[in-house]
Image: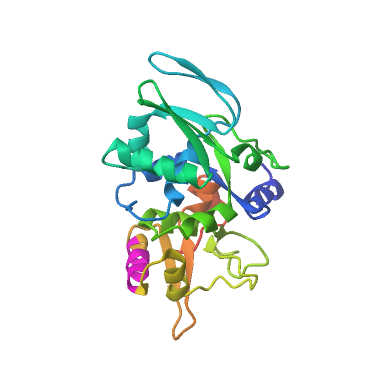
Amino acid sequence: MDNQTYQLKLKQIVEFSRCRIYRDFIRSLVTNKSIRTNGGSFLFYYIVLCSYANYRSSYRHTETMTYLVGPGEWICTLADLRTWFRCRFQHQAVSILDYLQKQNYITYSLLENKKVVKFKITDCPKGNTVLEYNFPCKKDDGFFFFPIAKVHELIIMGKCSEMDMFLDMWIHAIYNNPSVQCSYSGSVVYYRNNTGNPVTSFQTLSDCWSHSKTTVSRTLKKFEEMNLITLVSFTGKHGSMIYLNDYLSVMFDISDVIIEERGLLIIS
């Protein structure tokens, strides 16, 4: 693609009130045992379900049955769900489904002697349309759109896990937006406070994630040591900026080599 098209593709991520997330990225987080998932917020669990939901109708086969799975739906074994949610017991996975259904985020049913789960994201078809975007969502792979408003709803349901904190930052990242300071040099976390200033404080994050400032500081330091983020701190009471490493290669499905050739490596 030419440079103009390339730049447009990169900037599209900030054009809508939703975030484009690659399914493979979420599934890589499921297997990343270094980031803890225990907590009271349900952001991680809901995003996992969204990452599997159909875009178009298709048929799914189990050992004994064939099911028509519509847009926003998916079918899997309860054992699969326990693995995705990283629960020790299957009843814990069901309790998560119960809570999300009670909050009207999903509907679900247990089939085949409660060994199979069929769930539906209540507003998935509404959120996942082409929306004048260059690329339609794909069934089984590709990406899906996740409304940023849902993050705000889910993140306040309880103490965030490390995974919830990481996803919250990831979804709030902005790249190359003239209205957000320092976004030209990398994918910076910006909580859309209408100031254009991405500097935030540990106290703000503490209030958002329902943890102490000490826990927030320790978690961000852990992410930095894992090379997931770059934390730029300022003296005094100015706060910090958080850059996400590898954001462009993951969110735009662009290799690091291309990013480097274009001179778009984020700050490290």
Q: Is residue 47 visible?
A: no
Instruction: Say which quadrant the N terminus sits in.
Output: top right
**28 up-or-down from 246: above or below:** above
Identify the residue at the far right of this view: 132
Of 130 and 75, nearer the camera is 75
Q: Does residue 123 appear in this view?
A: yes
Q: Is residue 151 above or below residue 129?
A: below
Say if 98 sits above or below 165 in the image: above
Residue extending farthest left: 88
Residue 74, above or below 207: above
Determine if the magenta segment contains residue 216: yes
Please name whichever residue, 110 or 196, is drawn nearer the observer in this view of the structure: 110
Please say whether residue 231 is one of the residues in the magenta stretch: no
Q: Main secondary structure of the magenta part?
A: helix
| Place of residue 121 in the rendered image (x, y in percent of width and height, measured from the top left) | 54, 38
**Left of 57 or right of it: where is 178?**
right
Q: Give how far across and how far down residue 153 sits, in percent.
A: 53, 56
Residue at position x 65%, y 40% in the image: 126
Q: Quadrant of the C terminus?
A: bottom left
Q: Colour scheme of this structure image?
A: rainbow
Residue 115 horizontal side relative to residue 184, left or right: left
Residue at image coords 34%, 57%: 226
Quarter of the image where one finds residue 190: bottom right
Residue 175 position, x and y percent, is 59, 59
Numbered range of the magenta stretch = 214-222
User: What residue is drawn where x is 31% and y is 38%?
Assistant: 91
The front one of 225 and 42 is 42
In the image as oriented, which residue stretches furthest toward the bottom?
236
User: x%, y% of residue 257?
Assistant: 50, 47
